[in-house]
Amino acid sequence: MAKILMIDDDVMVLKLYSEVLSKEGHEVLSSNDAKKGLAMAAEKAPDLILLDIMMPDVEGTQVHESLRLNDKTKGIPVVFLTALVTDEEVAAADGKIGGIGYISKSTPNKKFIEQVNDILAKKK
């Protein structure tokens, strides 16, 4: 299946979603440090990056900007996985806010997997 990089400062969130994605056959890479996550993205070339917005050292929006400016990572789809918006808000915005994909952390696992798989299918 796909190689997915998750960048989130919450280790429990990384563990939970890594298990959910792994059960679907995806290879999951994770980092609870934004700067290390940026390096992993350039080195490992994942098919998708799931990125938290609120992190202590570097905000997710800054990580997203750095990814877009790097020739090695600018083509990798990035989706914010965040608690800042509800599943209903994301659905009302058709999955994108400001042109960037969002998945709410309140999304049930089954729907989360469907959303990730849809994003990956659109990439191909």
Image (cartoon, helix red, strand yellow):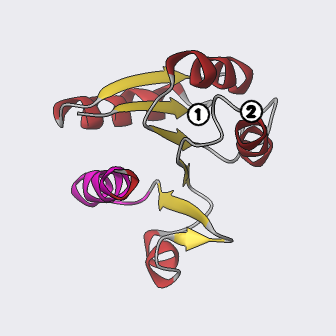
- Secondary structure beneath dot 2 equals loop
Q: Residue at x 58, y 33 (%)?
A: 8
Q: Residue furthest bottom?
A: 92
**Can residue 52 be found in the magenta stretch?**
no
Q: Is residue 63 above or below residue 92?
A: above
Identify the disc placed on residue 8: 1
Whichever of callouts 2 and 1 sits on the residue coming sooner in the sequence is: 1
Q: Left or right? Give the position of 114 relative to 86.
A: left
Q: Where does the image place residue 72, in percent across and percent down from the top left?
A: 64, 28
Mark 2 surroundings: few (<14), some (14-19) or many (≥20) residues within 10 A: few
Q: Which residue is mark 2?
A: 70
**Predominant secondary structure, magenta span:** helix
Mark 1 surroundings: few (<14), some (14-19) or many (≥20) residues within 10 A: many
Span colored in magenta: 106-121
Query: Who is closer to the viewer here, 109 or 74?
Result: 74
Q: Are marks 2 and 1 in contact (CB under 8 Å)?
A: no
Q: Left or right? Give the position of 89 relative to 63.
A: left
